[in-house]
Image (cartoon, grey):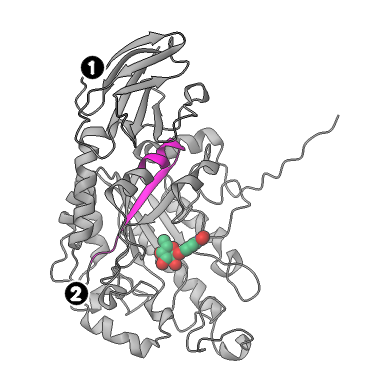
Amino acid sequence: AITATAQTKHIFNDPPEQKAQRMQWWTNARFGMFIHWGLYSLAARHEWVKQHERMTSEQYQKYFDHFNPDEFDPKKWAKEAKAAGMKYAVLTTKHHEGFCLFDSKYTDYKATNTQAKRDLVKEFVEAFRAEGIRIGFYYSLIDWHHPDFTIDRVHPQRLGENATGADYAKLNKGKNWERYRQYLYNQVKELMTNYGKIDILWLDFSYPGKNGKGREDWGSIELLKMVKQLQPGIIIDNRADLNDYTDGYDFETPEQVKPSELLKYKGKYWETCQTFSGSWGYYRDEHTWKTHRQLLDLLVTSVANGGNLILNVGPTARGEFDYRALHALDSLSYWMHANNPSIYNCTFAPDEYKLPGNPDIKQTYDPVKKHLYLHLFTYPIDGKLVLPGYADKISYAQFLNDASELLYKKEDSNIVLQLPAQPPPYEVPVIELFLR
Ligand code: JFZ
């Protein structure tokens, strides 16, 4: 007999049942808010503006000097997130630009030294916790401000547009990488120590290889050990370059993918991160905002494939969600208020309920209630909806938004639902089927 020797490298003792338990709130939550906020919000033209425009730290300094978020009120943010049905929120405590929203004792490049004069992370944590929203910290492994962060192919500061063939060794002379690694370790330790219970850590990101950076550079294993010791229940993303360890991360992070690409993640723990408009940081002149329908499609398709959606808001330099973001969140609130039972605690439907001829109906399933939810991305013009092979599968049918009965009859092995001519007033109406 051949004995399979499956590769099961692991760092901790974290059996699948224990992981499932730790992940349960997150899996049930399904919907979170990402918040990208930093000095780039002043430039208002992408959070990578420092790189895109090859700015030196001296040139970038004007944003630090002018950072004055006079309208910052995280209680408002938390209310918006809660109304939209988001159950957790992940804030950029430090993005690639290196600016810290928190009061770190390892740098002067922080919010407390700007006109804001206070620890913005602390206020975020308090406000969101008060609304019952779980807390996540995004922390950039990359740092374009720290003097010991070495220049490489992804970060060609001051190399000009053509960085290929650059002599990195020469460019990085005098930099002490070990000092940077210690800095990042210390800062993550502060974040894991000074703000109470943290539910999610979102490290970003690795690009291993020659002239790249990965687990050895970040000291990823030591980092995770420290994090899990300080925050035993924490959930960590997969961008610290530990993907070949069973427990080197908790969830995968397909970024800005189309709904149709989410199928392949079924059965894993995953969260797709998505923007409203393309950029993560506030981008004033961006005109590519997703429609209400596209946002619902992302949310429903994520759950229909067993994953989470984290939707990003980029607050303005004054510390507010701009009107387009507020409008998008309001539309989601309206839909979620009526239809959230098809999102929370739900996952993909068992295969026997497939409706192969009907790609415009997306299904989610609550395995505890044994209810099946049909999301109608098109509404039948004659009100007739045929569910092939369903004759013995359901005991009751209703619209989800108002629990109004839907009449149906059996025809051979099929169920034929009779829907009203006037659809419920939601971009995507939902039918709730009680399974036998
Ligand atoms: C990163 C950041 O560079 C970006 O600014 C934003 O914060 C986003 C959430 O994360 O961008 C990435 C990181 C990883 C991949 C792509 C973009 N990836 O793994 O494909």
Which of pointers 1 and 2 indicates the residue nearer the eye? Answer: 1
The crowd level at tag 2 (other Cα within 10 Å; few <14, some 14-19, many 20+) is few
Of residues 39 and 380, the one nearer the viewer is 380
Percent x, y for residue 279? Answer: 36, 66
In the figure, is residue 172 to the left or right of 157? right
- Report the residue that reaches farthest toward the left: 70
Percent x, y for residue 213? Answer: 57, 70
Q: Which of the 4 image quarters holds residue 1?
A: top right
User: What range of the chain is rendered magenta?
Assistant: 299-315
Q: Name the residue under label 1.
A: 405
- Secondary structure under tag 1 reads loop
Ligand 1 shows up in which quadrant of the image?
bottom left
The crowd level at tag 1 (other Cα within 10 Å; few <14, some 14-19, many 20+) is some
165 versus 347 height, above or below: below
Looking at marks 1 and 2 on the same chain, the residue that comes earlier in the sequence is marked by 2
In the figure, is residue 279 to the left or right of 151? left
Residue 117 in sight:
yes
Placement of the C terminus among the 4 image quadrants = top left
CA–CA distance in space, label 1 to label 2: 56 Å
Q: Which mark is residue 117?
A: 2
Of residues 383 and 204, the one nearer the viewer is 383
Percent x, y for residue 99? Answer: 34, 75
In the figure, is residue 238 to the left or right of 381? right
| Amino acid marked by disc 1 | Glu
Residue at x 52%, y 32% (from the top left corner) = 17
Q: Is residue 312 magenta?
A: yes
